[in-house]
Image (tube, rainbow, N blue to C red):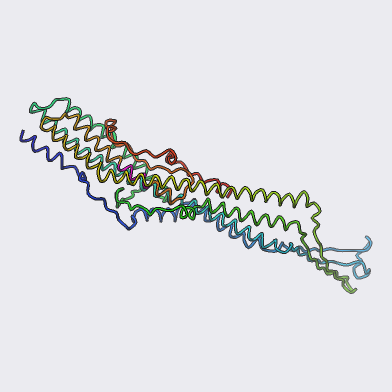
């Protein structure tokens, strides 16, 4: 009996991290996360490709404002076929002519503006790649902290079960417990090994994903200087701030401006273009001749060409205006959904931290003490332990989903929020504890799928 009494306080107090101290809220960013973001933004090939596309389109701007290339014409005019008559006949000469096309005033400026807005569209596409890359890194790092937090929780549960097994064995040896209690404790410890293997695999998979983003070997280690509960909560963004960050909305608005310029250009195309020609005609020993001329294009097919082009761009302008409103409305919907989820997840987090976890731990300790005195069954104490572990796991999932909503808000994503999932905590017996809070259908999406770039970016 004395040996049994010595086990009880050790069982209740030995597991690390069971006391619920106030969670720290650091104000400085995580240095590991900052390093991951820096490496990903410096090395990821998708971002390099997008930046090259921006530079490519910027090179098109000066090209669009340059005059068309001139032409040089060389010729010979000769009287008769028997011999060369240059210098003998007045109508026989060599000719050198220079022709410079001249568009109608204003066309070159409009073409340059169209090219400049094209560079803005490429910049919007680059911003989407950057925002999505940053979001992927943040989600991967949060998932890594989630899995490592789950592994720590599994280690705590393993310590409890190991000591519970010793307690059940001692009670069985002194004739106060049953063999079934001892076998059940051994069964739970075996199931924990399966969960540990699953979490190890999930951690390695998450590491490989993060290392891909920063262009490292898949097995390179990533240290963690903070726990999931210690991540600073980002500042919430309002609708206007999210709209200002949205590449899709910026791209849709740029498309409207570009269509306006193309419409103006189509209207100017109904005006004729010019060409100036200057030529010199040497005649050998005779005085040379020269010529100057102006040619004008005749838009005689304007009814089926230029006017149709104007109508085409007018219809395109209407569609682009509707596109802007569609993107803006969807973005406001996503922002509102995420704001609601953030408020709910904050309340859930505070309830777990300030009440539910404390109550769950107290219930487990009380049932364990009652089992020691024979007033409660081993199964009841085990279910209380599983309930505490389930509540701790659900708390970690709540923290992860809160980060996921903030990440999606910063990303200004039009697609539903990508949830951050960890591994499996333990056996089916853990399901008697609390379940992780579900993400609403409006914001849930299968992890690992690419973000929908939205209707506006499809046209870039």
Question: To which quarter of the image does residue 296 belong?
Answer: bottom right
Location of residue 328 in the rendering, given as x and y in whole percent from the top left corner: 52, 49
Q: Is residue 400 magenta?
A: yes
- Residue at left offset 46%, top offset 43%: 416
Location of residue 290 in the rendering, given as x and y in whole percent from the top left corner: 85, 70
Which region is colored magenta?
A: 395-403
Residue 367 lies left or right of residue 387; in this view the side is left
Examine the rendered structure and indicate whether residue 103 appears above or below residue 361: below
Location of residue 410 in the rendering, given as x and y in whole percent from the top left corner: 43, 52
Question: To which quarter of the image does residue 119 belong?
Answer: bottom right
Residue in front for this viewpoint, 193 or 446: 446
Instruction: Indicate the quadrant containing the N terminus: top left, top right, bottom left or bottom right.
Output: top left
Residue 226 lies left or right of residue 237; in this view the side is left
Location of residue 26 in the rendering, given as x and y in whole percent from the top left corner: 30, 56
Question: To which quarter of the image does residue 392 belong?
Answer: top left
Residue in front for this viewpoint, 168 or 59: 168
- The chief SS type of the magenta part is helix
- Residue at left offset 33%, top offset 43%: 398
Examine the rendered structure and indicate whether residue 74 appears above or below residue 214: below
Res. 219 in view: no
Q: Is residue 313 magenta?
A: no
How many marks the image carries: the answer is 0
């Amino acid at each position: 009996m004395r040996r049994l009494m010595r086990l009880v306080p050790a069982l209740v107090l030995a597991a690390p991290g069971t006391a619920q101290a106030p969670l720290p809220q650091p104000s400085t960013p995580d240095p590991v996360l900052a390093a991951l973001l820096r490496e990903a933004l410096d090395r990821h090939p998708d971002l390099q490709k997008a930046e090259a596309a921006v530079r490519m389109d910027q090179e098109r701007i000066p090209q669009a404002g340059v005059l068309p290339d001139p032409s040089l014409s060389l010729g010979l005019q000769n009287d008769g076929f028997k011999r060369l008559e240059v210098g003998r006949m007045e109508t026989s000469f060599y000719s050198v002519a220079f022709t410079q096309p001249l568009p109608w005033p204003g066309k070159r400026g409009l073409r340059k503006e169209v090219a400049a807005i094209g560079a803005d569209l490429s910049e919007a596409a680059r911003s989407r790649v950057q925002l999505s890359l940053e979001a992927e890194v943040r989600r991967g790092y949060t998932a890594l902290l989630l899995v490592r937090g789950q592994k720590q929780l599994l280690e705590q549960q393993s310590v409890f079960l190991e000591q519970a097994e010793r307690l059940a064995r001692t009670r069985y040896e002194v004739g106060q417990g049953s063999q079934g209690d001892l076998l059940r404790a051994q069964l739970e410890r075996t199931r924990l090994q399966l969960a540990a293997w699953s979490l190890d695999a999930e951690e390695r998979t998450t590491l490989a994903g993060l290392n891909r983003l920063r262009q490292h070997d898949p097995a390179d280690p990533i240290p963690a200087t903070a726990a999931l509960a210690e991540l600073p909560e980002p500042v919430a963004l309002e609708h206007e701030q999210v709209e200002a960050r949205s590449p899709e909305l910026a791209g849709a608005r740029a498309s409207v401006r570009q269509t306006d310029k193309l419409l103006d250009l189509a209207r100017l195309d109904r005006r004729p273009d010019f060409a100036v020609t200057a030529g010199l005609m040497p005649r050998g020993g005779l005085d040379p001749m020269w010529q100057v001329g102006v040619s004008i294009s005749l838009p005689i097919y304007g009814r089926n060409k230029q006017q149709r082009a104007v109508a085409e761009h007018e219809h395109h302008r209407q569609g682009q205006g509707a596109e802007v409103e569609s993107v803006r409305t969807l973005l406001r919907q996503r922002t509102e959904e995420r704001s609601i989820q953030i408020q709910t997840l904050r309340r859930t987090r505070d309830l777990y931290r300030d009440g539910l976890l404390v109550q769950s731990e107290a219930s487990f300790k009380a049932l364990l003490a009652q089992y020691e005195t024979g007033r409660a069954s081993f199964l009841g104490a085990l279910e209380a332990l599983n309930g505490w572990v389930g509540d701790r796991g659900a708390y970690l999932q709540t923290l992860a989903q809160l980060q996921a909503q903030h990440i999606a808000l910063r990303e200004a994503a039009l697609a539903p929020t990508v949830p951050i999932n960890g591994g499996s905590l333990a056996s089916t017996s853990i399901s008697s504890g609390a379940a992780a809070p579900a993400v609403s259908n409006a914001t849930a999406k299968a992890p690992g799928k690419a973000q929908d770039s939205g209707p506006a970016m499809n046209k870039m």
